Amino acid sequence: MIKNNINKIKKLRKITGSGLIDCKNALIKSNNNIKNAIIEMRKIGILKFNEKKNISIINGIVKTKKEGKYGIIIEVNCQTDFTSKSKEFRNFINNIIQKILNNNIKNTIKYNLIYKNEIINLFNKIKENINIKRVFILNENIIEEYNHNNRIGVLIQAKFIQKKKLKKIAMHIASNKPDFINIENIYYNLIINEYKIQKNLIKKKNFLYKKILFGKIIKYINEITLINQKFIFNTLIKIKKILNNKNSIILNFIRYELGEKKIK
């Protein structure tokens, strides 16, 4: 009997392209009748949902939220810009954010699997594929967030700094796209690769060669590290000067931009 059930699950998976759990549940509801199981899956929208899973989804929303000692940033994708502006889609994101915060869910969990039923329910309303692309949570210390047109989001965590000033630094991060806080955070291989690139670009190997090469590496480091960037609200000073005035410390920051391939 058990073997027969397994064979039916395999057969239903082959016919529908659906997951193991979906097939198993559909067969249970239909008393192990494959035809009735397919009807059951159609009723709740699983089949149509699975048919559209591989369709390109390049639109969506990046959203940030602070609540208590927590800050959350999330990117959820959909197929069309029209849907990204719809009330249903935005309510869905707000509900997912609240569930993540309420349950203190960690960043490593597969959100699309956990919230599959919610995603299918939304799919049945808007007939578009939905994907929770990424989520990150910060907690404790001072947290600030900034969101630009639901396309760029920043979460930043710091100590010994005014929230108003931290908000401006979050806006700076949104604009200037730093990858790291300071040189200590840069991956060693990145500097080595940049060294090799600049070494090949310098044509004349004269007595200034090492000085020029060193200067280019320093410039590269300054461009990708937050504290060495010129502050967008006062380009005469760098971020590190703002921090040094009050012994402020940036502990972490996360920047999401809608549709970017780079995942931090």
Image (cartoon, grey):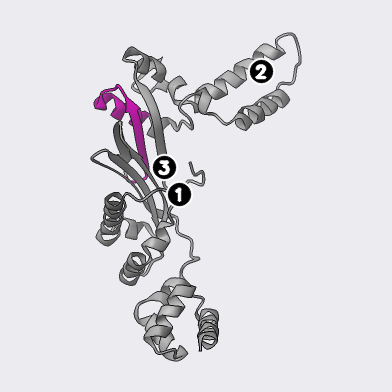
Q: Is residue 33 above or below residue 25?
A: below
- Please name the residue shown 40% across and 79% down the image: 25
Q: Residues within 10 Å of mark 1 (few under 14, many from 20)?
A: some
Q: CA distance from mark 2 to mark 3?
A: 32 Å
Image coordinates for residue 40, horizontal then vertical, percent: 38, 84
Q: Which residue is mark 3?
A: 256
**Disc nearest the viewer among 1 and 3:** 3
The region drawn magenta spans 150-172
Left or right side of 106 for 20: right
Where's residue 67, x and y in %? Answer: 24, 42
Q: Residue furthest right?
A: 205
Tell me the element at label 1: loop
Instruction: Please report whichever mark, 2 or 3, sits nearer to the chain's N-terminal start.
Output: 2
- Circle 2: element type: helix
**Distance between the alpha carbons at the discs numbered 2 and 1:** 34 Å
Q: Nearer the viewer, residue 12 or 233?
A: 12
Find residue 249 and report its image quarter: top left
**Residue at x 48%, y 26% (from the top left corner):** 225
- The residue that appears at 32% across and 66% down in the rendered structure is 122
Q: Are marks 1 and 3 in contact (CB under 8 Å)?
A: no
Q: Residue at x 48, y 41 (%)?
A: 264
On the question of residue 198 being in view, the answer is yes
The answer to whether 244 is drawn above or below residue 16 in the figure is above
Residue that numbered label 1 is attached to: 259
Pointer 2 or 1: first along the chain = 2
**x, y percentage for residue 44?**
35, 78
Q: Position of residue 197 (x, y in %)?
A: 68, 29
Q: Which residue is mark 2?
A: 213
How far apart, in angstroms, are the residues tagged by discs 1 and 3?
9 Å
10 Å neighbourhood of mark 3: few (<14), some, or many (≥20)? many
The type of residue carrying mark 2 is: Leu
